[in-house]
Image: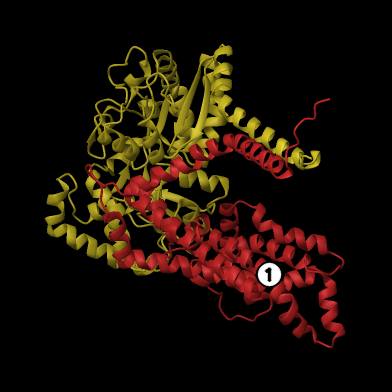
Amino acid sequence: MSISRTRSGRLPVIVFGVLVALVALLVAGMPAFSEGQQSHSQAPTIKVADTISGPNFIAYWKTVWIPAIKKKYGINVQFTKASAPELQLQMKSWKQDQPEFNLLFIRGLDLSNMVVAGDPLESLYPSKQDQIPNESMEAKSFLPANNGVPLHGEGLIMWRAQFDLIFNSQNVKNPPKTWKEFYDRRAEFKGHIGIIRPDAASGGGRAFIYSFLTAFGVDFSKPFAEVQKEPAWTSAWQKFTDFSKYFAQPAASSAPVLFHQFQTGQVWVTDYAQDYCIWSAAQGALPPTTKASALDVNVVGASNAWLVVPKADSSAQKAAAYKVINYLLSNEAQVGMLMNMYEYPGTTAWKQAPKSIWEKIAPVDVAESHGIRITNFDAITYIKKHGMDYVQQ
Amino acid sequence: MKQQPVESPTVTVGKARTRLDWAAWALALPLVVFLAFAFFYPLGYTVVQSFLKEHGAGATLLNYSQFLASGKGQGVLLLTVFLSLMATLVSVLLSVPLALVLRKRFFGKSFIQFLMLVPALIPALVGALGLLILYDRTGWLNYFLVRVVHVAPHPLVIDYTIPGMILFYVWIYFPYGALVILSGLQSIDPSVEEAGVVLGASPTRVFWSIVFPLLRPSLWAGSILIFLQAFGAFSVPLITGGNHRPLAVMIYTTATVFLEWPRASAMAVIMGLIQAVLVMVFRRLQSGKEATS
């Protein structure tokens, strides 16, 4: 006599097994499937990893730049919002001719981190002048180094972010013109000065502090070890700690939280990215009475965007990536970005922009005359790790 | 005609069981392979990372010792456990009466059950931003309390506070436990309660003496679910926590802002171990209570 499982008892096991096998085959077959798609497609595809764009530029990529690149060059752009630390980890495993991304669109600090880490990046300037003719229009002063880190031409600047005093003109009728005036008038703004945490992913708070310390005498052009020994370092931080007693509490963990604080009237004034704020006000994320004005010290380039090509790209991928870069550095793309997104171009195309734009934001040369670059990488690292220790909570 | 030897029933069952074991393993193999690469490998990588030095080659225990020995690290652990425990307690206290009500039939029952699920359907980040706006000093709640019913002279400060975070945790993680508890309650045979009533027990006595012991396994299961979710909370405390930053936020900051992967990995391992230990303790308590009841 044999005892066997009933058919109904065996059936669920078989069904489960078939399902698991199908899932496994699907997962294993996905790379082959996508490679097949690519090989059958006539148009080249460039995969872009973006670590800098906020929601404004993510939408702009999808609605303006990607269609324009497709129309002009027939290149498909696959856009992915990425995280720089994870991207750096992934890059270690990329094989030659098989990178996960062909073009990196990253913030300056990310580029500095990659160069310091020795990540393999293609040198673009000036060696690729033939393939990227528009790189001749780049604002040359930005290219040699970023955050004090020599770049060896491994990045081309796409936009120059400008930090300004951002204020709600409904509450702040007469904005301060200098950091000293801002500090002296702190009681007037008590509980209404906004700042993003310096240990946040956004660099806004770090740029705020860097500008403040510079305005109160810290000379970041020196090596950081020397900077820390100077009396100005201690006194400027003491002033900042005192200033922080007048901040809106708590310090915002991110830009949306800062904008929410503006919307509710908790924050009246801050120092943050001009383009993001003016665009956000136009979208309704900030009060419509939000304006920007220059202080005596403004950070230029805290959130500059850079175009970078991994060395792991194949020759064909590099050729396509250079075309994409060439479009992005064209007058069409750069002036469009200025007019629609209030972002200063990485090239000299701003000189050809309609004059109407300068009624909303300061001309580039005026803004840059008040501008400082973040050149001290070690100082920014210190501010990142210890900045909150100086904020009175 | 030669007769075939007859196998004994025991041998037949044994062979069938062996065939079934092999078949089960063969069918499970793709899943095991998938889990090995998608789960165990990344987990192992994190554990290995946690023993690496921040700078230079070699292994170290400093990532663990510095975190566990520091006041900041201990504070973060305490905050995380406290928030999770409070969120669990409040969620369970709300779930049981709600489940008792939802056992009955009434008009609008399905709608209320749907409302229970809404927090689980909305992405945590979206929910966190919404809660921030709702409970802000100028938000709808304070507008109602101060301007409409005039019960509060000043706006309540809820955002960026620990009570506020507990409230937000409960809002977001409550459905996970409530569904389990409701399911457990619905599976209790009503005739058991009826028997208690027939024998003269009051509704309160029936609940504590009959329903509650039978509901205990579901309560434990629901509590574990809520606790684990709350312990690993990230979006909610990042947006609404202000200066109160529990472990997941600290891991995120350490990894992606400070770029200190070994330290962040050590914190992640500590987080995982705590969760694993607490789950084992919960289950030990659960099985112990079930045995005595």
Which residue bears the numbered disc 1?
A: B95
Q: Quadrant of the N terminus of chain B?
A: top right
| Tint applied to chain A in the drawing | yellow
Q: Chain ID for label 1?
A: B
Q: Is residue A19 above or below residue A322?
A: below
Q: Position of residue A215 (x, y in %)?
A: 24, 53
Q: Position of residue A95 (x, y in %)?
A: 38, 23
Q: Is residue A336 above or below residue B45?
A: above
Q: For this view, does A193 lie left or right of residue A212? A: right
Q: Is residue B174 above or below residue A343?
A: below
Which of the pair A95/A160 is nearer the observer?
Answer: A95
Q: Please name the residue shown 80% across and 60% down the image.
A: B111
Q: Please name the residue shown 56% across and 22% down the image.
A: A34
Residue B20 visible in rendering: yes
Q: Position of residue B284 (x, y in %)?
A: 55, 67
Q: Position of residue A176 (x, y in %)?
A: 34, 57
Q: For this view, does B54 lie left or right of residue B135? A: left
Dot 1, how many residues are within 10 Å of its Cα: few (below 14), some (14-19), or many (20+)? many
Which of the pair A43/A141 is nearer the observer?
Answer: A43
Q: Tell me where residue B28 sits by quadrant.
A: top right
| Tint applied to chain B in the drawing | red
Q: Please name the residue shown 54% across and 22% down the image.
A: A68
Callout 1 amino acid: Ser
Q: Secondary structure at mark 1?
A: helix
Q: Is residue B143 above or below residue A57?
A: below
